[in-house]
Image (tube, grey):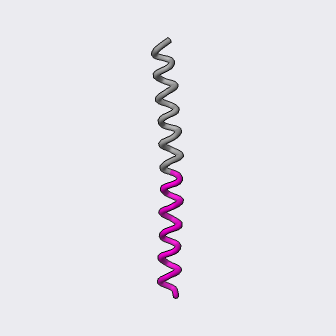
Amino acid sequence: RLQQNDLDDKESNSLKEEQQLKEKLCLFISYIKQLKEQVAK
């Protein structure tokens, strides 16, 4: 039982990390787009 809970915790943790990574990636991409637009002006 404990091991199963441990596994579930690890899975949810990695899911959270994945979510955070995706958010950072989105921010990064939008930031780059803004930079490109500024350069194009």
- Provide residue 10's location: percent of width, then percent of height: 48, 70
Which residue lies most toward the top here? 41
**Count of numbered badges drawn on the protein:** 0
- Provide residue 41's location: percent of width, then percent of height: 50, 11
Which residue is depicted at the point 46% across and 14% down?
Answer: 40
Which residue is depicted at the point 49% across and 27% down?
Answer: 33
- Provide residue 19's location: percent of width, then percent of height: 53, 54
Q: From this view, report whether residue 5 is shown above or below residue 35.
A: below
Which residue is depicted at the point 53% across and 38% down?
Answer: 27
Q: From this view, report whether residue 31 is shown above or below residue 9.
A: above
Q: Indicate yes or no whether the magenta region holds residue 2.
A: yes
Which region is colored magenta? 1-20
- Main secondary structure along the magenta-highlighted residues: helix
- Provide residue 37's location: percent of width, then percent of height: 50, 19
Which residue is depicted at the point 51% across and 85% down?
Answer: 2
Q: Indicate yes or no whether the magenta region holds residue 31.
A: no
